[in-house]
Image (cartoon, helix red, strand yellow):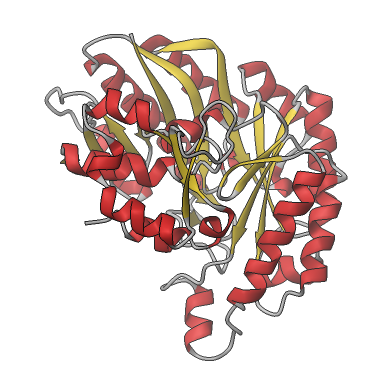
Amino acid sequence: MTEHALYFHIPFCRHRCAYCDFNTYAGQDALIPAYVEALCREIEIVGQAAPEEVEASTIFFGGGTPSLLSVSDFSSIFKTLRQNFNLREDAEISLEANPGTLTERYLEGLYALGFNRLSLGVQSAHPDELRMLERNHSYGDVISAALAARKAGFDNLSFDLIFGLPEQSLERWQATVKLILGLHPKHLSLYALTIEEGTPFGLWAERGMLPLPDPDLAAEMYEWASDYLYAKDYQQYEISNWTKPNQECQHNLQYWRNLPYLGFGAGGHGYATGMRYANILGIQPYIDRLSQEKNQLSFPLSPAVVSKEIVGSEQEMQEHLLMGLRLTNEGVSAEAFHTRFGRSLENVFSKEIDELIGLGLLEWADKKTSEVSKTSEVLRLTPRGRLLGNQVFLRFVS
């Protein structure tokens, strides 16, 4: 039995935020019933094509706004999942949600289905910053959602925040983080704002209508948050993620450890049997593809797939290193690398590793103690390397 993570993309939104470049669509809620039916069909096709039973260790519903689906919609999806995959009893089952879309009754229904982790897109605690980001919730909605979630049975709450906003001060960022900690989340994801081409933010920035974020101030915000959260007993386990002890997001760890996952839905991506693949982006095209009768496809593909590639050994080693280095303490184990690829990490990337250690961006650390050591087994980013992660990663991309 092979263990996989399962990702479901729910691309519906009530409003597309100005900074967002994800595969999301507003004003298409009428397609939700047909979309859920197509998702169930894709689950059946992929599950039945598997050469052996697939064990689902984690399930993650992302978007978009997955909380726009009803409890009944999720019930249909879970019924189909259990018919086609072996869902582990202790599986982590996460839902991304916008705070303004949740009620206690709705959350009770989700909890009864098996959801046990909730990730809320908070972004900021300040009304003017939320308006700039075009978020349709208030910080009061965040408080209400957290209280309702705990009443419904959810103990594992994660909050997403964005820093480095145009004209955002360090003090305002600090206030957001401190307010959020008052809600006692188990997990936090902190992301620096990126101005993406093709978004309203990108267009406004091109026209001089939006001040560009200050990278030096954003770095100061990141370093302050790292120190402050450490003092509050949050452990940084990935470049952008902090957790209370033993509350890491298991689904995302599957990605960062370069282990197999299956992607479902419009724009879903997957990696399994040495193959990376991507589904068609649009909602209606996705529905259309799953409504047509097609010949049996080989696992893990479905009729929604529009691109695929076999990952060769050199590329796989690069991706393993790129993903693993995001894990700030765990890093990349030299022993695990050799076991997986039959080659030495130090030999394959000797030039790049030596250069980056010389620049103070990488270090070797002892696997058991995580202390820096010359006789160590784990390659990881230094604190400075976390700030300059993209420069590190580029060294390993051929």
Q: Is residue 222 left or right of residue 49?
A: right
Residue drawn at x 39%, y 13% is: 85
Quadrant assignment, res 143: top right
Closer to the camera in the image, 259 or 23: 259
What residue is shown at x 76% (from left), y 26% (from top)? 155
Q: Nearer the viewer, residue 138 or 286?
A: 138
Q: Is residue 288 left or right of residue 386?
A: left
Foreground pick, 85 / 383: 383
Which is more toward the observer, 329 or 29? 329
Residue 308 coordinates in the image, percent (x, y) = 19, 42
Tell me, yes or no, if residue 308 can be seen here: no
Tell me the quadrant of the picture where the C terminus can be found: bottom left
In this rendering, the count of numbered labels is: 0
In this image, 91 relative to 355: left or right? right
| Residue at figure coordinates x 50%, y 90% from the top left | 207
Identity of the residue furthest to the left in this view: 295
In the current view of this chain or complex, which residue is farthest to the bottom? 208
The image shows residue 16 at horizontal and vertical percentages of: 55, 61
Q: Quadrant of residue 71?
A: top right
Left or right: 7 with respect to 372? Answer: left
Q: Residue 140 location in percent, x, y?
A: 85, 52
Name the image quarter holding residue 150. Answer: top right
Q: Quadrant of the N terminus?
A: top left
